[in-house]
């Protein structure tokens, strides 16, 4: 099984995300990560989907997506020619005696402290999925209260652009 990252350019209409995600659930495909947002053109949205599956299943996914009415373009990101990132907010049990150690780990991973109380600390981190998973693993011994991850978002390196070809 291989891990695939797709970017799907869609019309920014109500219900499009539901139709895209519904396609996956109806066919029994599993989504590892899903991220969506508007583009530089407010009439368009980009959905980034990460799936882990066999090649034949991946071809079926692309085929089925291309049949959806509001799908304009589908692009598969190659690992070498794209930038992929995920953002995470991590709330840690951070009583004063633990803070120095937590801050050292945060500095190693270039995480930012965005909130501190007497008993907790919230870190913000951006990086690839491996980096996010690694800091979560290291911080787990301090007592993680909450973790929220955005899901992967990706963009092609260089001059390549995923735009509506009719523009």
Image (spheres, rainbow, N blue to C red):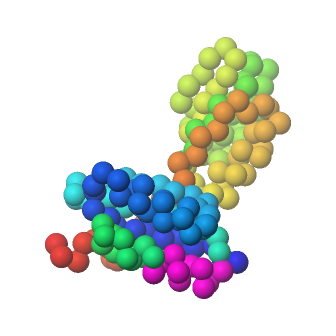
Left or right position of 21 against 138: left
Image height of 145 relative to 137, above or below: above
Residue at (40% x, 56% y) in the render: 17
Q: Nearer the viewer, residue 5 or 142?
A: 5
Q: Is residue 154 visible?
A: no
Q: Main secondary structure of the magenta part?
A: helix
State which quarter of the image contains the C terminus.
bottom left
Image x and y of residue 35, in percent: 47, 55
Q: Residue furthest left?
A: 167
Residue name at image x 27 percent, y 55 percent: 13
Side (left or right) of 6 relative to 144: left
Seen at 66% across and 33% down, the residue is 146
Instruction: Give the magenta-colored segment's residue range.
Output: 54-63
Q: Report whether residue 45 is seen.
A: yes
Point 23% across, 54% down: residue: 42
Question: Could you say which is closer to the camera, residue 87 or residue 19?
Answer: 19
Horizontal side, residue 79 vs residue 96: left or right: left
Furthest residue in direction right, as rendered: 141
Residue 101: quadrant of the picture: top right
Magenta stretch containing residue 56, yes or no? yes
Q: Relative to 12, say whether 24 is above or below.
A: below
Pick out the residue farthest to the front: 26
Q: Residue 53 appears at what percent x and percent y? A: 65, 75
Is 136 covered by the magenta stretch?
A: no
Q: Is 33 placed above or below 3 here?
A: above
Above or below, 36 against 123 in this view is below
Quadrant of the image for the N terminus? bottom right
Q: Count the labels in the image.
A: 0
């Amino acid at each position: 099984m291989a891990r695939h990252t797709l970017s799907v350019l869609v019309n920014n209409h109500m219900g499009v995300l539901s139709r895209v995600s519904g396609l996956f659930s109806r066919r029994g495909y599993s989504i590892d990560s899903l991220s969506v947002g508007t583009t530089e053109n407010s009439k368009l949205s980009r959905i980034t989907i990460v799936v882990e599956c066999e090649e034949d299943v991946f071809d079926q996914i692309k085929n089925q997506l291309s049949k959806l009415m509001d799908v304009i373009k589908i692009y598969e990101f190659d690992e070498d020619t794209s930038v992929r990132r995920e953002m995470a907010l991590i709330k840690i049990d951070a009583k004063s005696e633990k803070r120095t150690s937590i801050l050292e780990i945060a500095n190693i991973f270039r995480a930012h402290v965005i909130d501190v109380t007497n008993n907790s600390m919230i870190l913000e981190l951006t990086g690839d999925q491996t980096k996010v998973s690694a800091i979560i693993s290291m911080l787990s011994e301090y007592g993680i209260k909450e973790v929220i991850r955005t899901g992967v978002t990706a963009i092609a390196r260089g001059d390549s652009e995923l735009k509506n070809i009719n523009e």
